[in-house]
Image: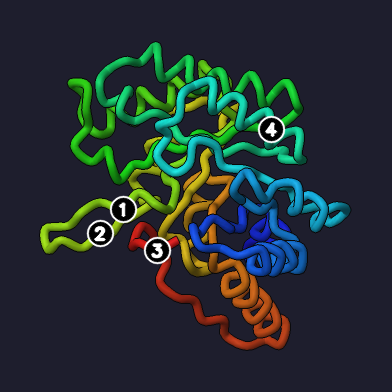
Amino acid sequence: MKYTYEQLAKMIDHSLLHPTMTDQELEAGCQLAAKYSVASVCIKPYAVKRAAELLKGTGVFVGAVIGFPHGNSTTESKRYETELACRDGAVEIDMVVNLGKALSGDWPYVERDVKAVCDEAHRHGAKVKVIFENDYLTKGGAGLSSDDFKKQLCELCERAGADWVKTSSGYGFVKQPDGSYNYKGATEHDLALMRASVSAKVQVKAAGGVRDLDGLIKVRELGVSRCGATATAAMLDEYRRREAAEQAGQKVEGTSAAIGAGGY
């Protein structure tokens, strides 16, 4: 295997964000995250305290979403939500930018919004991932093309103190011509663009559309250090299967490495 189990497992932020998630499902998700030794769980703010209790001593971080999923809370609400999450035990914060303000070209507002969360998180020793929701940005905005708009957001987030830039929330559904809703999430194009648009001190997180081991490996090779996922068990069980086959001298079969096909 080209990468160790730990290298790939520690890329995964196990996502526990579904709107209907019960307390029992949250606890089971934390237990799964600990079993597979992933990087973190990514959870809703009310659940931080319980997750911190469940994951104490496991080496799995607790991350909380802020202004989720649409980024439309006031800046002070986002800052205070960050403060409370950090007090409860979150050491990573995944915040959503105010896309309406960004698409309006009010870049100073957006930068202040991100900086307020970064400053608060950093005060508590926590790190920040800033979510763009790229599915909403396919036509660009504020007089910029789609790629230039994303570059602008990347540069703004780095100035504001972000530790990661992140493609998606996993819930940025776009209405399709047939009336259904869907989204792509992370795409190879966007990940390469975002990696090239920030310095080495800012990391990149993929979210949405990475659902198998080959997809996880692919985004790693694009320079991604974290990946939001719900298919954690399937990906890491597949790693163990291939590892065992390789050790037994058997041919290792991979699957398609396509990403950005929807699903989180």
On the rendered structure, is 169 left or right of 189?
A: right
The numbered mark, 1 or 4, whose residue comes first in the sequence reads: 4
Quarter of the image where one finds residue 83? top right
Q: Are marks 1 and 2 in contact (CB under 8 Å)?
A: yes
Residue in front for this viewpoint, 52 or 249: 52
Instruction: Give the labeled residue for mark 2.
Output: 181
Q: Residue at x 71, y 87 (%)?
A: 248
In whole angstroms, how far apart are the C-alphas of marks 3 and 4?
A: 30 Å
Q: Residue at x 51, y 16 (%)?
A: 159
Please state which of the two labelled residues, at mark 3 or mark 2, is closer to the viewer: 2
Q: Disc 4 residue type?
A: Leu
Q: Residue reaching furthest top?
A: 108
Sort mark 1 into few (<14), some (14-19) or many (20+) by Cα contacts within 10 Å: some
Q: Residue 262's spot in the image, x, y percent?
A: 35, 61
Quarter of the image where one finds residue 167? top left
The numbered mark, 3 or 4, whose residue comes first in the sequence reads: 4
- Visible in this render: residue 46? yes
Please state which of the two labelled residues, at mark 1 or mark 4, is closer to the viewer: 4
Q: Are marks 2 and 4 in contact (CB under 8 Å)?
A: no
Q: Residue 191's spot in the image, x, y percent?
A: 41, 44
From this view, report whether residue 178 is shown above or below residue 57: below
In whole angstroms, how far apart are the C-alphas of marks 1 and 4?
A: 28 Å
On the rendered structure, is 74 left or right of 188?
A: right
Q: Disc 3 residue type?
A: Gly
Q: Disc 2 residue type?
A: Tyr
Colour convention of the picture: rainbow
Instruction: Give the labeled residue for mark 3.
Output: 263
Element at label 3: loop
